[in-house]
Image: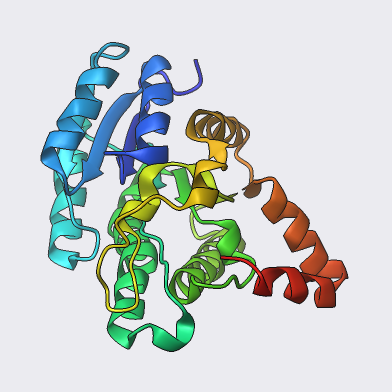
Amino acid sequence: MHYTDKVILITGASSGIGHELALLLAKEKARLILAARNQAALEAVRNQCLSYTPWCEIVLMDVTDEAQVQEGARRALQFFGKIDVLVNNAGVTQRSKLIDTSVAAVRQLMEVNFFGAVMLTQALLPHFRAQGGGQIIIISSMAGLMGYPWRSGYNAAKHALQGYFETLQTENPIPKLYTTIICPGRVRTPITYSAITANGEAYGKMDPKQVKGLSVALCAQRILKAMHKRKKMVLIAREERILLWFKRYFPPLFYMIARKGN
């Protein structure tokens, strides 16, 4: 299979898309390195992955802490001597109105969703250059392509991801380094439980619209397919895709619909 024996580092691997993608890659007999903050949850995912592949390691990493990111990258490289694929998946969403949201909360959203991916990518780019290439997967969002109510800081962070990693694609500093930007819409994961509110606290409940999102299994399958094909950018969405089309071709209709959203 495509990723058999490939070394793959996945951040945010303890739940949601990261967890599901880890299982799919384990079934391809990849050599996995799973990163997140929650050791118990990571170990549970590792145990599941070990049912399919004999190689699965974990690294505790808070992607907002530069020292932890640097140390995590160093340790990850020690496990198998290389990294073929980096999946920047760690992220946190938001549920608060822009006018009520503190600057501290916006900074927190930027640190997790944007700077975490930037710091880990920068830490590994010298390795990718030395080995002559590799693959970077960015789990962005449809929120990186349009503004949407109650997600101001999250939207900003995902827009920043788009700009940064599209620049990596266009500069192409390492000819055989392939970068794929994934833009999911709503996916049925527990992400809204830890969503940041106006003062930086956790939202603590499931968003009803999130429950109606795409299944995480289907989302992960589409991500894996995009990885196989080394796509530049992939949209994985239903209603959000239509809303993006309105934004591009019928802006007044986009703003009318988006203002009613939550």
Identity of the residue drawn at 65% across and 46% down: 237
- Residue furthest to the right: 249
Q: Is 167 rendered above or below residue 141?
A: below
Q: Is 153 rendered above or below residue 143?
A: below
Identity of the residue drawn at 83% across and 78% down: 252
Q: Is residue 9 left or right of residue 159?
A: left
- Camera-side residue: 181 or 16? 16
- Camera-side residue: 224 or 232? 224
Place of residue 66 in the rendered image (x, y in percent of width and height, measured from the top left)? 19, 66
Place of residue 112 in the rendered image (x, y in percent of width and height, measured from the top left)? 31, 64
- Camera-side residue: 187 or 161? 187
Q: Is 259 rendered above or below residue 168?
A: below
* Residue 87 appears in view: yes
Place of residue 109 in the rendered image (x, y in percent of width and height, measured from the top left)? 35, 70
Which part of the image, by quadrant, shows the C terminus? Answer: bottom right
Q: Quadrant of residue 254?
A: bottom right
Identity of the residue drawn at 32% across and 56% down: 126
Q: Quadrant of residue 91?
A: bottom left
The colour scheme applied to this rendered structure is rainbow
Q: Is residue 244 left or right of residue 120?
A: right
* Residue 175 appears in view: no
Q: Is residue 251 left or right of residue 32?
A: right
Place of residue 257 in the rendered image (x, y in percent of width and height, measured from the top left)? 74, 68
Identity of the residue drawn at 31% across and 49% down: 127
Badge count: 0
